[in-house]
Amino acid sequence: MLRLILGLVFVFLTVCVFAQDTAPQQEPTTFYLDSETGDDSRSGQSPDAAWKTVKRLQQEKIVPGDSVLFRRGGLWRESLKPASGEPERPIVYGAYGEGEKPILQGSTARNTIGDWRSCGENLWETVRVEPIRGPKIPIDFSTSWYVHQEKPAEVKLENQRINEGNTIRLTVKATGGGSSRIQLIGPKIPAEGLQKPALLKFRARCTKPFKIPSISVRHPGAPWTNYLLASGAVTVTPDWQEFDVFLSLQSPSAEGQLAFYVGGAVPNDSVFELQPMALYAASLPEGQVPFSVDVGNILFDHGKLVGFKRWGLDELKEPGDFWHDTENGRVVVYFDKNPAELYRSIELCLKRDIISHSGVHDCVIRHLALRYSAAHGVGGMGAKRVVIEDCDIYFIGGGHLYTRNNRPTRYGNGIEWWCEAEDCLVQRCRLWEVYDVAFSPQGNQENRTIKNITIRNCTIWNCEQSFEYWRTGDGAVTENVVFEHNTCVDGGFGWSHRQRPNKRGTHFLSYTVTAKTNIVLRNNIFCRGANDLISMFTDWRSGIRLHNNLWWQPDGEDFLSFRGKGVFKAEEFSKYLDEHGMEKASIRAEPKFVDPTNRDYRLLPTSPGVKAATDGGPVGRRE
């Protein structure tokens, strides 16, 4: 009898497992978003029942095989965190309907006269936005504090009780060179505190005054994604002060950790004391943001005039000059009258990535326009099998990254792979007006690999650089990165070049490379660079191969700048080929484009370098 019962149980379990293995997969669902007529209370599963916001989309469980479609002609002032699919069932983010590509936009508008008020002769400031405090988030601030420090920083952390509150005391002997060199890490934040903006209440003092560079709620481990972020809004003095700091929502998450970045700012031989008090959910008036997140650029009438970012009120002297006063949460611009009287559209570009592909896998992003971000168009770490195709990415970057030795550094790339990525493809995209570089695999973490990245048939113009590569860190590997059949025009002729202190208008830029590297640039067109066409800071010839490219730079201008080894002028192209021992199939000649005035950079049949446009060729025409 026992054997019979055990046999029946075995048969039953086998049938259950077989039924699970052979059960049909769930039918894919398509979700629709319409920024004009959508409604987040609907199902989102048809054009007539479309959602309105990306925020509503991010609350939905998207499963492998699903699609998310944005209505053409729509505009969303929100960031997107794609969901992950499976190798044979990717999640697709795309477009539906007719008209221009759907726009994901990283800026906030200040278009009305009431958005600005006079604050001095020819000076206008944004009207302050006050956040609305919501319910308190339950957090125990008395435990779990520790400090992360990187040489040359040297600090000691203590916890003690002062004035009935838990006090974190940081004794600083050496501050280090950047904000990340000293990170004061606090407790984890529950998921309910990571779904909307927040207000952080705390007291602080320091024996020597300083400004806190950054406060965030971030991912507890790599890739250190910021979910809530404030920037530069707090000045600490020797007297105890109480602060309410607004943390803007970068992207919702289920886990996060409070972090104060103070390296390079908290003075040497000082004592910094912090008393965390409370964290509250917060909200803002419809369509408004406080300027705790850095404003890296201002576009007047969509680029008719581009703002010039300055670093103090006394530097505002020309129309369009602006200063982001993070301490007082305002932006100040220089004009002889209210800027909304001069321009119909005023877009303040915020330092947040439009799409984060950190940890995303098996995903397709197509037919979208990403614009007006002061950070990256697409950025992150750990992307696998992510395809980006037929997208437009423009007016990107300019956000404040860090200040070292009183010199601020700005950043912002079109598409960036940070430290780790695998099996990713970008094709038929157009990128223009990027502060730094259109495409870049880069990073400084140890034992990380970037491999099998292909960038092809893209058109790039007016970016400071077209392709940049640098990698450091023990055990770092870059393997099989291919940049091919791309048309790159006017490197360094864009909005950022005039206001950069470190001008490097070029098409291929290589900084320090210590990682094991295998990169190929072939069958591309590189036409005109403000400084040169290639900039080398280390000798990359052992790991980077160039082949069958068309180069053009007028006589008398620099072609290659090689730090420590001199400069090749454009007319010395043959000498460059002979001395570098590579690119034997490449040529120097002026390409003939179909209609460069209207950004149609396809090659005419009579143009030199037509072979560089095989395999589908570089694209250039607008839809």
Image (cartoon, rainbow, N blue to C red):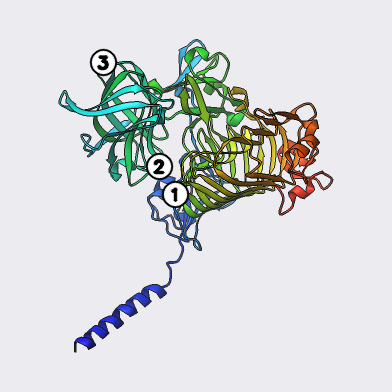
| Residue 342 locus on image (x, y percent) | 57, 22
Q: How many marks?
A: 3
Q: CA distance from mark 1 to mark 2?
A: 14 Å
Res. 290 visible in picture: no
Circle 2: residue type = Ser
Q: Which mark is residue 494?
A: none
Residue nearer the viewer, 248 or 345 = 248
Name the disc covering residue 239, or none.
Answer: 3
The earlier-in-sequence mark between 3 and 2 is 3
| Residue 23 quadrant | bottom left
Would you call the spot at circle 2 few (<14 residues within 10 Å), some (14-19), or many (20 or more)?
many
Instruction: Report the residue at 79% width, 45% height from top.
Output: 609
Q: CA distance from mark 3 to mark 2?
A: 35 Å
The residue closer to the viewer here, 18 or 508, is 508
- Marks 1 and 2: which is nearer the front? 1
Residue 52, horizontal then vertical, whole percent:
44, 47
Identify the residue under disc 1: 359
Left or right: where does residue 320 sit relative to residue 550? left
| Residue beneath disc 2 | 251
**Residue type, mark 3 in image:** Asp
